[in-house]
Image (spheres, rainbow, N blue to C red):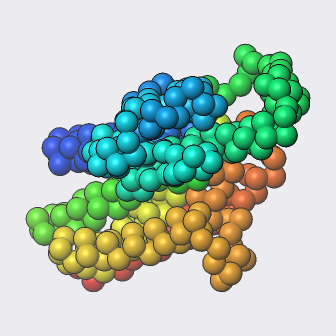
Amino acid sequence: MRILALSKKESQDILSNKIYLLVVVVQLFIILGAFGLAFISSMISDPNLIDQWQGSSAIKVGITEDLSGTTLEKSLKAQNLNLVYFKTAQEGKNALGTRMVAMIYLTNPKGDIGLDANTANVFYSVVASKITKALDSYRLQQKLSKQGLSTSQIAAIENPVVLKEVPINANSTAPLALDSSYFVEIMYGFIIPFVVLLPFFLASNIVTDSVVGEKERKTFEVLLMTPLSSTMVVVGKILPILLFSLVQSAAWILLLELLKVPIYHSLLLLVLLFFVGLIFIGLGVIISMLVDSTKEANSAITLLLFFATFLLFVPLFMDIPSLHGILNIIPTIIMVRMTSTPVLDPLVVLSFLPTIAVAIAIFGLSVYFFKKEGAIRL
């Protein structure tokens, strides 16, 4: 009952602190912003995806009137590009960069094509892909026409095989927000681990405010005089913050599910997050015992988070030989493997053991340093 009373007090302190509640709202905007960034960047880099979302019609490409009726024009229209016609190539070049992404024109009577493009435009990669496809088709038709082949024969050569997709188990497919390999890679490879760990990064500051705050308010000695063991006091300090962070992570998982990004094995993920959170918060307690002011604690936490970010997230993007030995036990790597596949090897749970061991060790150290600080003050 005593430890519950302390946990209740800590919970009330968290919920009554407007800064902590504001941080939750800020996290929401960060998550929605990250999702939106992945959404937009995947759409503007994938020609098929931008067609699916009917964005190609907003992309303007200039073309000279002497190309009207050609297979090049037909191919560009078939790819849903918004064509703007000009009498001369120079008129189109003058409008390039303001109204249009690219300008296509004949360079000579032989049918050679010239292309000018605004490479700074965000849609340039999509436009380049579409124009390249159209030009390949145009050049092929030009060569085949010179060989005397008819239009039907050319069409048969261009499309020798007609594929028909037959969906299987369509009802069990994952309702991803976007059908894009880039979107899947960035979401599961970075954003999901970042989102679920974000509350625990912030929890480190909460615990230092809680513990160091006791010292600054001169109530730390009063806390030591309560009929609670050092272990119970540390648990009473850590548990509310840990649960507060877990609830936030669970809420962000639910939010991603609502955004049509399935998070597989979410219960196992929360178990892993519990021990990862215990590591962060336990380190916060240890730092709090070694310093005497909130300013010093926040500086130390900043350095800790910098190191943690390197260890947790850099392996997701870079191949670092020195980390190969521990790659399979890094929590973010485990998260990526768990959340991105509906079929999970049961042995993956064994990869939790190093994290659990580290969490227990850090919790033990936090109790030890708390006892040591208490002995000094008493």
Choose between 86 and 187: the one closer to the eye: 86
Camera-side residue: 373 or 274?
Answer: 274
Instruction: Name the foreground residue: 368 vs 203.
Output: 203
Vertical order, 282 against 16 (above or below): below
Image position, residue 312 (x, y; %) = 53, 66
Judge left or right: residue 308 versus residue 27: right
Whole-percent x, y for residue 216 in the image: 13, 69
**Residue farthest toward the left in the current orientation of the protein:** 217
Between 364 and 77, the one lying in front of the other is 77
Viewer can see residue 314 = yes
Vertical placement of residue 273 versus 266, above or below: below
Residue drawn at point x = 66 percent, y = 83 percent:
322
Residue at (62, 39) in percent of width and height: 134
| Residue at x 82%, y 22% (from the top left corner) | 152
- Number of disc labels: 0
Hey, which residue is sitting farthest top in the picture? 171
Quadrant showing the C terminus: bottom left
